[in-house]
Image (cartoon, rainbow, N blue to C red):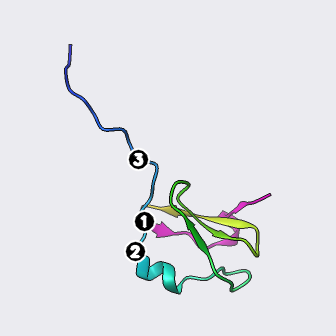
Amino acid sequence: MSTETHAPLSLATEVDPRLLEVLVCPVTHGPLTYDRVAGELVSKGAKLAYPIRDGVPIMLPEEARALD
């Protein structure tokens, strides 16, 4: 029986803050907000959430999740 304890895995994805300052939505060219918990960059104007994978924002509209 193992007595090891493991810290829970975090769902948060970290992105360089300097990168967040210069990125804009590729559809609207408007600002993005960072949703740290979901690991996404959100464009309220385009109603899209762009995923962040391994710390790299995937800024392709076809990869984005549509928002309600």
CA gap between label 2 and label 3 equals: 17 Å
| Above or below 8: residue 49 | below
Secondary structure category for the residue under label 3:
loop
Secondary structure category for the residue under label 1:
loop
Identity, as a three-letter code, of the amino acid under mark 2: Asp
Image mark count: 3
Residues in magenta? 56-68
Q: Earlier in the sequence, mark 1 or mark 2?
A: 2
Identity, as a three-letter code, of the amino acid under mark 3: Ser
Q: Quadrant of residue 40?
A: bottom right
Which of the two marks, 1 or 2, is nearer to us in this view? 2
Q: Residue tagged by mark 1?
A: 55
Give the position of the C terminus as an image quadrant. Answer: bottom right
Residue at image position (52%, 54%) is 37
Q: Earlier in the sequence, mark 2 or mark 3?
A: 3
Residue at image position (19%, 21%) is 3
Residue 61 image point, x, y percent: 69, 71
Residue at image position (41%, 47%) is 10
Number of residues whose C-alpha sits closer than 10 Å to that of mark 2, classed few (under 14), some (14–19) or many (20 or more): few
Q: Is residue 33 magenta?
A: no
Residue at image position (56%, 55%) is 38
| Above or below 28: residue 8 | above
| Above or below 35: residue 17 | below
Residue 46 image point, x, y percent: 76, 73
Q: Earlier in the sequence, mark 1 or mark 3?
A: 3
Q: Residue tagged by mark 3?
A: 10
Residue 5 image point, x, y percent: 24, 29
Which numbered marker is on residue 16? 2
Secondary structure category for the residue under label 2:
loop
Q: Quadrant of residue 49?
A: bottom right
Give the position of the N terminus as an image quadrant. Answer: top left
